């Protein structure tokens, strides 16, 4: 399936001709299919996939911005940052920091207060 091929090849430089060849249609036919089914071009869809995957990688917090850019097919970290900002409404570093803060808030909210029976049970290994 084309969507699987796209996800597996996010880091590769893909053209509409590459995608069309993968599914056995002409580039113009593929573009028309995308427009009809998804309301966007194959390139716009690929860009959306790349930037969504980039957001997921940033939330994981294990890679630098440059590494994330490379993993999702951007050879220039500055071009990646511009595209990310346009798509997600904030720069990648701020997105990652905001996601980290949300996770920290959820962990804090879910953890029982120190000194409560549930916290003491966990400390004793009873949970």
Image: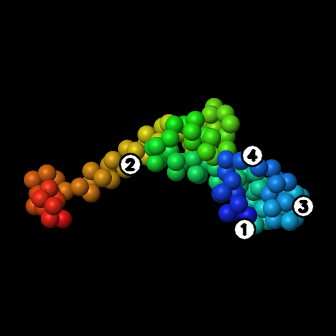
Quadrant holding the N terminus = bottom right
Q: Earlier in the sequence, mark 4 or mark 2?
A: 4
* N-terminal label among 1 and 2: 1
In contact (CB < 8 Å): disc 2 and disc 3: no
Label 4, residues with CA under 10 Å away: few <14, some 14-19, many ≥20: few
Spatial distance from mark 1 to mark 3, Cα to Cα? 16 Å
Q: Which residue is mark 3?
A: 26
Relative placement, left or right, of 7 versus 90 is: right
Closer to the N terminus: mark 1 or mark 3? 1
Q: Which residue is mark 4?
A: 13
x then y, percent, for residue 115: 9, 53
Question: Which quarter of the rendered picture does the C terminus lie within?
Answer: bottom left
Instruction: Residue under label 1, please give it.
Output: 1
Q: Position of residue 39 (x, y in %)?
A: 75, 60
Look at 71% across and 60% down and name the residue there.
5
Image point 70% across, 57% down: which residue?
Answer: 6
- Give the residue at mark 2: 102
Q: Disc 4 versus disc 2: distance between alpha carbons?
A: 33 Å
- Classify mark 2: residues with Cα within 10 Å, few (<14), some (14-19) or many (20+): few
Instruction: Count residues near mark 3 (Cα–Cα under 10 Å), then give few for <14, some for 14-19, many for 20+.
Output: some
Circle 3 — which element?
loop
Numbered disc in front, either 4 or 3: 4
Distance between mark 1 and mark 2 Cα atoms: 35 Å
**Marks 4 & 3, CB-CB < 8 Å contact:** no
Q: Is residue 22 visible?
A: yes
Q: Please give the name of the residue rendered at 63% of the width and 31% of the height, measured from the top-left corner.
A: 78
Dots 1 and 3: beta carbons under 8 Å?
A: no
C-alpha gap between disc 1 and disc 4:
18 Å
């Amino acid at each position: 399936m084309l969507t699987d091929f796209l996800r597996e090849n996010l880091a590769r430089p893909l053209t509409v001709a590459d995608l069309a060849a993968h599914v056995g249609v002409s580039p113009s036919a593929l573009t028309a299919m995308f427009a009809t089914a998804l309301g966007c071009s194959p390139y716009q869809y690929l860009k959306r996939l790349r930037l969504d995957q980039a957001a997921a990688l940033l939330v994981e917090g294990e890679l630098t911005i440059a590494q994330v850019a490379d993993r999702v097919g951007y050879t220039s970290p500055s071009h990646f940052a511009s595209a990310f900002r346009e798509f997600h409404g904030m720069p990648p570093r701020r997105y990652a920091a905001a996601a980290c803060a949300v996770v920290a808030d959820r962990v804090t909210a879910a953890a029982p207060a120190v000194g409560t029976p549930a916290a003491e049970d966990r400390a004793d290994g009873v949970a």
